[in-house]
Amino acid sequence: MRKPVADRDDYDSPWKDLLDRWQRPFLEFFFPRIAADIDWSRGFEFLDKELQKVTRRAVVGRRYVDKLVKVWRPGGEETWVLIHTEVQGEPDPGFARRLYTYHSRLMDRYDRPVATLVILADERRDWRPERYRHALWGCEAVLVFPVVKLLDFKTRPAELEASANPFALVVLAQVAAVATKRDPSARLDRKIALTRRLYRFGLSRDEVLSLYAFIDWVMTLPEPLEDDYHRAIQAIEEAEQMRYVTTAERIGMRKGMERGMERGMERGMERGMERGMERGMESERALLQRQARRRFGDAVAERAAALLALIRAPETLEQLGEALLDDADGEVWLTAVQAQTERADDRIDAAGDPSPAG
């Protein structure tokens, strides 16, 4: 079952793959001053575990990608860079506050200098959050963060065409996806042109496939036009004498994925959802217990384990995870856990209490 174009223009996974593969080109393209102030000879390090501890579990269906990277400046100073790519189509009133919270938690927890950078890949020209500010009675908290709006590149096609940076092609695809959202035929033409340019970019096979996956994801076509696209790519590969993924493989992968999804949904959705939810709950409880042990010690962690086992709602565990990061006292947190278990017991009792006979 092929989803409509509008429903499948989800940029989360492709952006994550690009940031994992091309960290230096990303900063050189979007934030050249910052890239120039980094000693790339020392390399860099992704800090996914450290970021997870301050952002909690990723929300299903989220419309943003966060990456935390450790780099070094020329003087030897270790610096952390929080890169936030926002893709949601509607303005989020809590966006700037969320970045301020992440920024503050990272500095407080790890005592490292942090630079927060933002990429806005949404379609709203007038949405440009650049700072968070809260003031009360002369006390003020402020975070100003550099922002790049991808829509701004729409007026800079010559610059993008001349650039050898892979993110120039990424931006061209992003801008084209927005411009052709309601015109599938125009999208087909732009997608073919971008893929032809990709094959002439002088990249390795793996790099070409990575960018191909991004273009294919953000510029989804209706099935008949997708077949036209496959035929065009076959012709391009023959002309360029580069055969990375054959047309038969593309069509086979697409149909195989669709058949597998349909059969999986028919036969295993209910069972898989139940098992997946239970495993997810077990993992969340274990994570909370580990974090409680690190933050409050063994005694609090052991007392919490028995209480957490009684909680069956994922959203309740998420709330307790947020409280664990904010509470300074383990007893205060345990009181919150106890309160949630009592509420769960009350709900069970209410559900099992038969109605009085009439």
Image (spheres, rainbow, N blue to C red):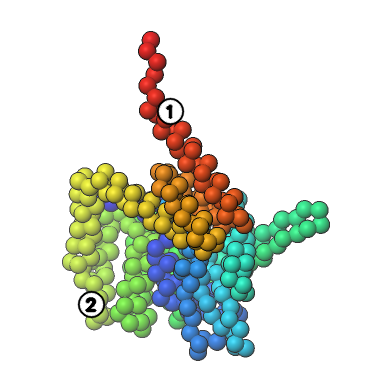
Tell me whether the residue at label 2 lies in contact with that at label 1, contact meaning CB atoms closer than 8 angstroms.
no
Q: Residue at x 36, y 83 (%)?
A: 202
Above or below: residue 233 compared with residue 264: below
The answer to which quarter of the image holds residue 31 is bottom right
The answer to which quarter of the image holds residue 311 is top left
Which one is in front, 277 or 177? Answer: 277
Above or below: residue 201 compared with residue 156: below
Q: Secondary structure at mark 1?
A: helix
Q: Which residue is mark 1?
A: 350
Q: Closer to the observer: label 2 or label 1?
A: 1
Q: Which mark is residue 140?
A: none
Q: Which residue is mark 2?
A: 243
Alpha-carbon distance for marks 2 and 1?
64 Å
Q: Does residue 320 appear anywhere in the picture? A: yes
Quarter placement of the C terminus: top left
Give the percent coordinates (x, y) of residue 235.
23, 73
Left or right of residue 84: residue 350:
left
| Mark 2 residue type | Arg
Q: Does residue 125 appear anywhere in the picture? A: no
Q: Residue at x 33, y 53 (%)?
A: 279
Give the percent coordinates (x, y) of residue 141.
72, 60
| Sequence-wise first label, 2 or 1 | 2
Left or right of residue 81: residue 3:
left
Above or below: residue 192 compared with residue 255: below
Give the percent coordinates (x, y) of residue 189.
35, 64
| Mark 1 residue type | Ala
Seen from this angle, which residue lies furthest front?
Answer: 299
